Amino acid sequence: MSIKQALISVSDKTGVIDLARALRRSGITILSTGGTARLLQQENIPVTEISDYTGFPEMLDGRVKTLHPKVHAGILARNDLPEHVATMKKAGIADIELVIVNLYPFTQTIAKPDCNLEEAIENIDIGGPTMVRAAAKNYKKVTVITDPADYPLLLNEITANQGEISLPLRFRFACKAFSHTAAYDSAISNYLTAINDDESHNAFPATLNLNFNLLQNLRYGENPHQKAAFYRGIETVPGGLADYQQLQGKELSYNNIADTDAAWECVKSFEDPACVIIKHANPCGVAVADTIQDAYLRAFATDPTSAFGGIIAFNRTLDADTAAAALKQFVEVIIAPGITNEAKSLLAQKNNIRVLILPLEHGSNAYDLKRIGGGLLVQTPDNFRLERSDLNVVTHRKPTEQQLDDLLFAWRVAKFVKSNTIVFCRNKQTLGIGAGQMSRVDSAKIATIKAQEAGFDLTGSVVASDAFFPFRDGLDVVIQAGAQAVIQPGGSIRDDEVIAAANEQNVTMILTGVRHFRH
């Protein structure tokens, strides 16, 4: 079925002029509305305005323009049903075989800091979604386009097939159209159901709608007997892992993606050249240095055994010297904001290593999500950034400037380690990390053992604990190992006992008042 008539009504005008010209060259007549029609007329592209086509003027400030039988019958009529054909002929209504529509910019509007409810409501499209859904429902006759990125594919198909679009492609466009309107309505629902009676906003909507696009099916999930897929959110998160570019290596697995995300989020939190090595979602080595090569060597030294087969993240462009150092060990994934040609050539020698590039930006998800049986736990992300002004020194002994730097470094690392967490550091290098234990004292013991096995002397080190010490026993373990300064949230009913233990052993203790559980 060749296209004879198209309706174009777009909020996003990207590429629409070239598209319209190409459609006219193919002999397709164009109907259009409002601003789109004016734009095409300014470019001397023949177009019929909807009001002229229907014989009924736009009304109510443009709220009613395409909601007319001549438009919707043209879209919804089925040519395979004789009664439809007869009805259309009797009414003198022509078919519309191509609908090119995108919607009022609702999400862009509500993203403005000064957006109010009235402005948001005015940017809820009515006629647009109606046409899109009608065209998608009748995909056997109508082609519907909602994304300017699909214009080249549409025109190639028209050119190659004398104005016809294949049924599989029409169905594909229809599926995309329904997803487009579903996401649009989801954004409206999320926004409106989060509004209080005074028009202020709750953190969470009463009905939470989530929309993600399938990027790829994965070989398997956490384990080979589990199926898995990777989806990207329809809303862009600057610097979010879902926008990575893979330069080489095998396909990423489910575990690769999860671990790489943990590494990337951690390394992004440092301003100076930094390296983070992740194994099973936990940092096994983190360091800051003057160069990322030195940062890598220091991070690797924390736990060379665990770093085997790990994920390495850098917050600077990967250079040849650093790449050469990393190639001496087995690594699954390397991610950085850039890579030199020399480093790229070196890594190509081991083409199984997955090399990812991603701009170093600091966006974050709107929500953290965790599925439970029949439900979903939702929270805002843990974006709290501790500053020196937030620190509360509660012991007789005060920290030195070097200790303050190391304590803040250790605290930043602890945020990305599974609870319960103990992190030993010195000179902005992790020395021993205890993660994911049921008791804090066990995490303290494991961190001590890890440091000793790596050959580190913990004398004079600092320690971060992601949550309070419920008893003095965990504190005693890290002090006996050599720690001279400790940072922890506080908040235990035994804080006085723990602080007294620190004073008794002449150790500095700082309370943050903020906890960093990570489960």
Image (spheres, rainbow, N blue to C red):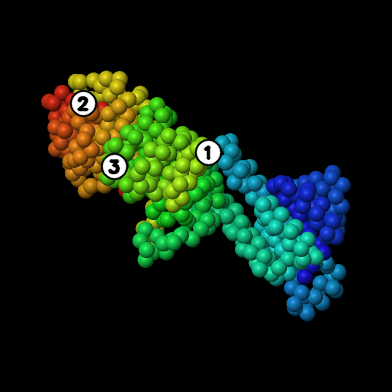
Q: Which residue is mark 2?
A: 460
How many angstroms separate mark 2 from mark 1 (CA)? 42 Å
Q: Residue at x 19, y 28 (%)?
A: 459
Q: Are marks 2 and 1 in contact (CB under 8 Å)?
A: no
Q: Is residue 135 left or right of residue 207?
A: right
Secondary element type, mark 1: helix
57 or 457: nearer the viewer: 457
Picture disc at residue 304:
3
Q: Is residue 380 visible?
A: no
Q: Amino acid at mark 1?
A: Asn
Instruction: Work out whether mark 2 precedes mark 1 in sequence or the reverse, and give the earlier one.
Output: 1
Picture disc at residue 234:
none
Position in image of residue 516 (x %, y %): 32, 39
Q: Residue at x 61, y 56 (%)?
A: 180
Q: Is residue 32 left or right of residue 338?
A: right
Instruction: Work out whether mark 2 precedes mark 3 in sequence or the reverse, and give the earlier one.
Output: 3
Q: Residue at x 21, y 26 (%)?
A: 460
Vertical comparison of 376 with 93: above or below: above
Q: Which residue is mark 1?
A: 341
Vertical comparison of 369 with 225: above or below: above
Q: Is residue 371 left or right of residue 506?
A: right
Quadrant housing residue 461:
top left
Rendered-image quadrant of the N terminus = bottom right
Q: Amino acid at mark 3?
A: Pro
Q: Amino acid at mark 2?
A: Gly
Marks 2, 3: nearer the viewer: 3
Mark 1 burial class by Cα count in 10 Å: few <14, some 14-19, many 20+: few
Marks 3, 1: nearer the viewer: 1
Quadrant housing residue 285:
top left
Secondary element type, mark 2: loop
How many angstroms separate mark 3 from mark 1 (CA)? 28 Å
